Amino acid sequence: MEVRIGVAHVPREVVVEVTISPDEVTALITAALAQSGGLLILTDDKGRTIVVPGAAVGYVEMGPPSARRVGFAG
């Protein structure tokens, strides 16, 4: 599943491919936003860890993985 995170004061969104369920992602987001100084910690499908301060999370969008484009768009 693809997770897109909009971070305050950062022009690009963070895109993460995760293997956990949407309910698990929602629980992690809720916990990060509920605590003062909370952190949203996700591990992508390649084992890399992404950490975003809960206070900096602007929005989160979840959905199916996007298709990888190959070649030139035309």
Image (cartoon, grey):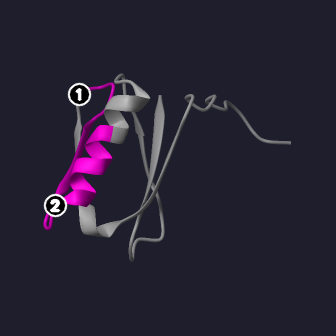
Q: Quadrant of the C terminus?
A: top right
Foreground mark, 2 or 1, reads 2
Residue 1 locus on image (x, y percent): 47, 28
Q: Is residue 42 magenta?
A: yes
Residue 11 visible in rendering:
yes
Residue pushed farthest left? Answer: 37
- Tell me the quarter of the picture where residue 44 sits: top left
Residue bearing mark 1: 47
Residue pushed farthest right? Answer: 74
Q: Amino acid at mark 1?
A: Gly
Instruction: Estimate how packed mark 2 is, as few (under 14), some (14 to 19) or many (20 or more) residues with alpha carbons within 10 Å.
Output: few
Residue 57 locus on image (x, y percent): 35, 63
Q: Is residue 24 magenta?
A: no
Q: Considering only vertical position in the picture, is 45 above or below 39?
A: above
Taking the spot 31% from the left edge, 68% from the top edge, the residue there is 56
Residue pushed farthest front? Answer: 34
| Magenta stretch, residue numbers | 27-46
Residue 40 locus on image (x, y percent): 24, 50
Q: Nearer the viewer, residue 3 or 47?
A: 3
Give the mark, 2 or 1, whose residue is nearer the N terminus.
2
Q: Amino acid at mark 2?
A: Gln
Q: Secondary structure at mark 1?
A: loop
* Residue 61 located left or right of residue 21: right
Residue bearing mark 2: 35
Taking the spot 32% from the left edge, 31% from the top edge, the residue there is 24
